[in-house]
Every structure is written in structure tokens, then in C-alpha cells.
Amino acid sequence: MARFTGTGTMELGGRYSRMYDCRVETVGGVVMSGSDQKLENCEFVFSQVRVSDNSRRVIIRGNYIIPNDQPGILFLGRNDGAVVVGNVIADGVGGG
Amino acid sequence: MVAAIQFNGDSATRKVVVTGNYLMSQDYGIEVLSQVTELIVSGNQFLNSGVSVAADFFEGTIVGNDFFLTSGNNNGGVYIETDNSGDILIDSNKINGARRHGIYIDDGPGASGVNDCVISNNLITGPGTQGPANTYDGIHVAGAASRNYIHGNKIIPRSSNGTRYGINMAGSGDCNVIVGNHLGDPANYGTDALAPGTGNILTYPNDPTYGDNFTECPPESP
């Protein structure tokens, strides 16, 4: 399983990008942009998923998200056709 | 502590489906702070967190969710505070132990009302656990809300008259239809089972005290 640590932000952009089976520990988390992206089966530990303005048809499925004093999934603007399914978002489970 | 899922952008979001998630927060499970239309929230488990809409426009469907709200920050079940909005369906949710109102509809800052919504078939158990007693209702409709249809809900009040009203039509709007809800004995509420408001269409078979105070209503908007 890929593991991402540090303070930065990763961008899942373009079209038909897919990120799966990973562990994200970066405070900035993952930003989804573009269209037709999938984010699946990842663990976010004190991290976050952001869906940027003008993204289309993103799928956020099967992730486990422990936010750190921020929304687990944050929609920023026009995000037509997003599907958020089967995630666990557990604020307050750990520190933060 | 913040929302599990939040909508907070500068432009409108539309056609979003949120389904089958487990949302645990001491704040909101889903918080809508910016304009969203065609939002479907269905089949989610909310632990200590409700749905809050405080946007300038909202339209959506909130169906078949399970809210378990024994703690958290001031959480009610479904709170809608918005303007110029309507066509909202809140149906078949289980709302257990809401800290405040079970379902709450009110205007936003523009005071223009939430209209033409359906609130139906919800099971609301023990709303108003956040004190003091006799402060919160099962369903609370405020502001200019008109032409809403409130049907088939079952509300079980807190013990010791802790829930104020089963359904409280507290706003200035009219032509809301309240029909076929099961509220139980008015004596089990802090104030009463139903506050009917004025100009609404009532059918409340459990207590003939509440007659039909129907007034002539304008046609519904298309």
C-alpha cells in the first residue's frame, strides 16, 4: 500500500485518473479536480479530501477518513455529478 | 470539530449523491453552506451528527437515513434554513435522540420561506435532549414556509414532557397541509402535541379539538 506523509497536497487531476489502496497522512490531503476521477479504498489519517471547483463526475468510494479539525470531504464550488458512497468519516476518533 | 462532509464553494453544486456512508462527528454529518441543487442524501448512518443547510438556495432529497444523536454540538436531525427554496423531500428517516428539533425548517437571512416541501414518514424519537425541557419539537416549521406537506410522521416525545410539541407550525406562512401524523397523547408533551398555526390545512384524527382551519390557498407554483 502506498503511503503519503508530510504537509503537502496531492492533486488527482486531468481525466479518468484513479487513486486507490493508499494511506494518506498529509495534512493537505488529496484535491480532486478535472473530471471522471475515482478515489477508492484509501485511508486518510488526520487528512482530507477536497473536490475543487469545476470538477465533474468524481467518485469517492470506500475510503476511511479521520479528519483533523477540517471536513473529511469538502466540496468547493461547482461539482456536477459527484458520487460519495460507502465511506467512513469519523471525526473525533483520534486526536485533532 | 467540523462537518464530516461540507459544501462550501463560490459557485453552485448540483447533482451530487451521498449514499451508504457512515458519518460520525461531534458537529454536522453533512453541512451545506453554499448553493446546492439536486442533492441526494440516502441510506447513510449519522452518529451524533445531523444534516444542516444554511445556504442561500437549496433543493434536495433526504431519504432513508438513520440519525443517532445522543451527543454532539447542538445537533438536531435535519435543519433547513434557506431562502427562495423548495422542492425538498425529507422522507423515511429515523431520527433518534435529537439534541434540538428533530426536523427544522426556517427562512434564511432573506426571510423568503421554504415552500412546497414534503416531510413524510419520518420516525422521530425523543427530540430535544439538549436542555432545558419543553424547548424543542419533533418537527418545527418557522418563518414564511408555506404549501409544505407534512404527512405520516410518527413522533415519540421525550419522557417527563421534555419535548415541547410534536409538530409546531410556528411560522407566518400558510397553506401547509398537516395530515395523518401520529403524535400520541398531547399530555405527554411539554406544551401540546400540535401547534397548528393559522391558515393551514389540518387533519388530526386523534384529537377533534383541532378542527379544519382551512383558508383559501393560492395555486401551487409549477
Image (spheres, coloured by chain):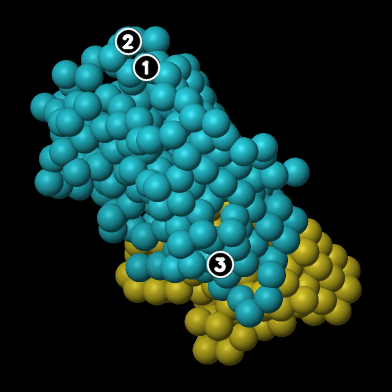
Q: To which residue does mark 1 refer?
A: B211
Relative to B10, is B93 above or below?
A: above
- Judging depth in this view, the residue of A73 and B61 nearest the camera is B61
Secondary structure of the residue carrying numbered label 3: loop
Q: To which residue does mark 2 refer?
A: B208
Where residue B124 sits in the image (x, y, percent)? 38, 30
- For chain A, what colour was chosen? yellow
Q: Tell me what residue is drawn at x 37 percent, y 17 percent.
A: B211
Residue A5 visible somewhere in the drawing: no
Secondary structure of the residue carrying numbered label 1: loop
From the viewer's perspective, is B153 left or right of A36? left
Q: Residue B56 got which mark?
A: 3
Where residue B55 sits in the image (x, y, percent)? 53, 65
Q: Are marks 2 and 1 on the same chain?
A: yes
Q: Tell me what residue is drawn at x 31 percent, y 11 percent.
A: B207
In the displayed image of the protein, which residue is found farthest to the front? B216
Q: Chain of mark 2?
A: B
Q: Residue B99 got which mark?
A: none
Determine which quarter of the picture holds residue B126.
Answer: top left
